[in-house]
Amino acid sequence: MTPVELSRTVLHAVRRAVETGELSVSVPERVVVTEPGAGGCGDFATNVALQLARPAGRAPRQVAEILRAYLVGAEGIQDVVVTGPGFLNISLGERADLVAGVVTEILERGGAYGHSEVLAGQVVVLRVPYEARAEAVADAVVRIVATQGGRGEVEHGEPVNLRPVPAPEDPAPLGADAARWALLHPAPHDRPRITADHLMQRESNPLFRVRYAHARVRAVCRNAGRLGFGAEPGPVEARGVVTALSEHPRILTAAATHRAPDRLARHLVTVADAVLPFLPTVLPRGEEKPSAAHRARLALAEAAGTVLAGGLTLLGIDAPEHL
């Protein structure tokens, strides 16, 4: 079960509780599931009970216990534990199934992984000033909104509804890719830095880490081909990478609905930082022969590269094969 599928399962539990009269609330459009925090357990957790408690007129733990009854025994769910004020901690049947499910979905959908119809039929009108950063943000938002089934239109003139803090100087000398990153990576209320740091090939440069991670994935895939083995999703011990990849659909939706490409940019950094330490484990070493474990690791690496490439493309930035 993938995080997206689990989110739908939790949402179905809420809907059933409402239909049977155990909860009197409006069913939310979506439920967010994340990795358990401090004091949590299992594979994923959700705070949906805390969100529904006030409109339901019940204590959060009461809401959580009601939802737990609908979740226990659902296909793919092994156990559900209520912790803290009312967090639902969910254990899936097999962690290996989760990994294979996420990787398989990414490899099958390719650049369309994370796309949805959340904004289907909606036209998002962006009125921006004539300013470099506003133009770059609007262009990225149009691309991201399209991944969620919506259509973006950019207009100029007052009253504006998208006005990020302007760049302090012309970013063009940085080159197309670094300039766009400099304008899109900071939050809209933060002033972007137009400095040569964005061109440095070092770990302190987030753009370099993202592009380097993609280039390294492509290199690993080429080398695997030379060794005569391909990718095959399976169990992999790389929780950080899997978690980052499974969050991608949620991040894309949030970036689209909040008109915030910076969320996608920061997520790509998270994916890159998770996958880079993992890549040295993909290829066989010395006289070691390619095994099922190597094929599963390669599949996970390919999935990460797919997400990195797709995200960079949405930001209007090149995803290099070599770096």
Image (cartoon, rainbow, N blue to C red):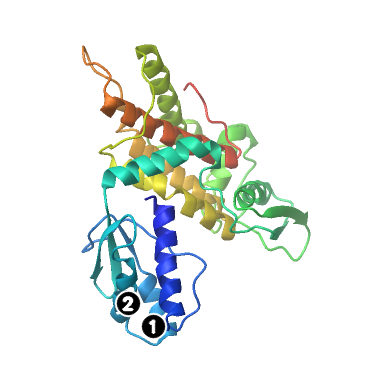
Name the image quarter holding residue 302.
top left
Secondary structure under badge 2? helix
The residue lying toward the viewer, choosing from 139 and 116, is 116
What residue is rendered at 22% in x and 13% in y? 286
Tell me which numbered mark, 1 or 2, is placed earlier along the sequence.
1
The residue indicated by pointer 2 is 66
- Is 278 placed above or below 165 here? above
The residue lying toward the viewer, choosing from 174 and 315, is 315
The residue indicated by pointer 1 is 22
What residue is rendered at 42% in x and 38% in y? 104
Name the image quarter holding residue 129.
bottom right
Instruction: Identify residue type, mark 2.
Output: Ile
Q: Indicate the position of residue 118 as horizontal and vertical percent values.
A: 58, 58
Q: Is residue 190 visible?
A: no
Pointer 1 with pointer 2, Cβ within 8 A: yes
| Image-based side of 298 in relation to 11, left or right | left
Q: Is residue 19 visible?
A: yes
Instruction: Identify residue type, mark 1.
Output: Glu
Mark 2, Cα crowd under 10 Å, few <14 / some 14-19 / many 20+, is some
Identify the disc placed on residue 284.
none
Q: Indicate the position of residue 86 as horizontal and vertical percent values.
A: 29, 74
What residue is rendered at 28% in x and 39% in y? 238
Mark 1, Cα crowd under 10 Å, few <14 / some 14-19 / many 20+, is some
Cα separation, mark 1 vs mark 2, equals 7 Å
- Is 289 placed above or below 302 here? above
Secondary structure under badge 1? loop
All told, the count of numbered labels is: 2
| Image-based side of 146 in relation to 248, left or right | right
Q: Indicate the position of residue 294 as horizontal and vertical percent values.
A: 29, 25
What residue is rendered at 34% in x and 40% in y? 274
The residue lying toward the viewer, choosing from 51 and 174, is 51
Q: Indicate the position of residue 47 as horizontal and vertical percent values.
A: 36, 69
